[in-house]
Image (tube, helix red, strand yellow):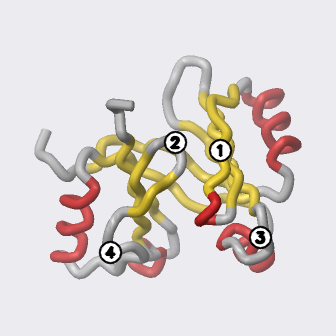
Amino acid sequence: MEKGMLENLYHVAIAVRDLEQVEKIYETALGLKVEHREVVEDQGVRTSMLVPEKGGTAIELLEPIDDNSPISKFLEKRGEGIHHICYLVDDIEAVLSRLKERGVRLIDESPRPGAYNSRVAFIHPKAMNGVLIELAEINKSE
């Protein structure tokens, strides 16, 4: 596969007000299991990654840890629900470079640290017909 390509849909992120309550709903109703929880201070969120028993696309829950976080503002404006979708990439710099060359509007011109030992960047929703897209490169060596 050529470097700098999308690999697969990694997760669908959902903004929530009460992480533990929503985890229980997804565990009970869908049989998903919490694989990892993490606080991402610079984004102002607590995250929880829920995965299907047999693998596949995960659900990421995002709960604000303060009133100034982007998720807090999202909840205030839109309420709970889908926040973004995330694709794994093999070379985030190459993907961002290709998008810039094609004139795609980006939120992040370069990657930043993300949850789950990743580097992430977001494509502006205005470039994707109203959908916020996250690109994530997972450091598989750690």
Report the mark closest to the observer, 1 or 3: 1
Q: Mark 3 or 4 closer to N-term?
A: 3
Q: Mark 4 or 1 closer to N-term?
A: 1
Residue 142 location (% of width, % of height): 39, 31
The answer for how far apart the CA atoms under marks 4 and 1 are is 24 Å
Q: Mark 2 or 1 closer to N-term?
A: 1
Question: Which quadrant: the N terminus?
Answer: top left
**Left or right: where 72 falls relative to 140:** right
* Residue on which the image places disc 3: 75
* Residue on which the image places disc 1: 38
Q: Which mark is residue 109?
A: 4
Q: Mark 2 or 4 closer to N-term?
A: 4
Residue 46 in the image: above or below residue 129: above
The answer for how far apart the CA atoms under marks 2 and 4 are is 21 Å
Q: Amino acid at mark 1?
A: Glu
Circles 1, 3 touching at the beta carbon (< 8 Å): no
Q: Residue at x 68, y 64 (%)?
A: 44
Q: Quadrant of residue 75?
A: bottom right
**Left or right: where 57 falls relative to 135:** right
The answer for how far apart the CA atoms under marks 2 and 3 are is 23 Å
Report the mark closest to the observer, 3 or 4: 4
Report the mark closest to the observer, 4 or 1: 1
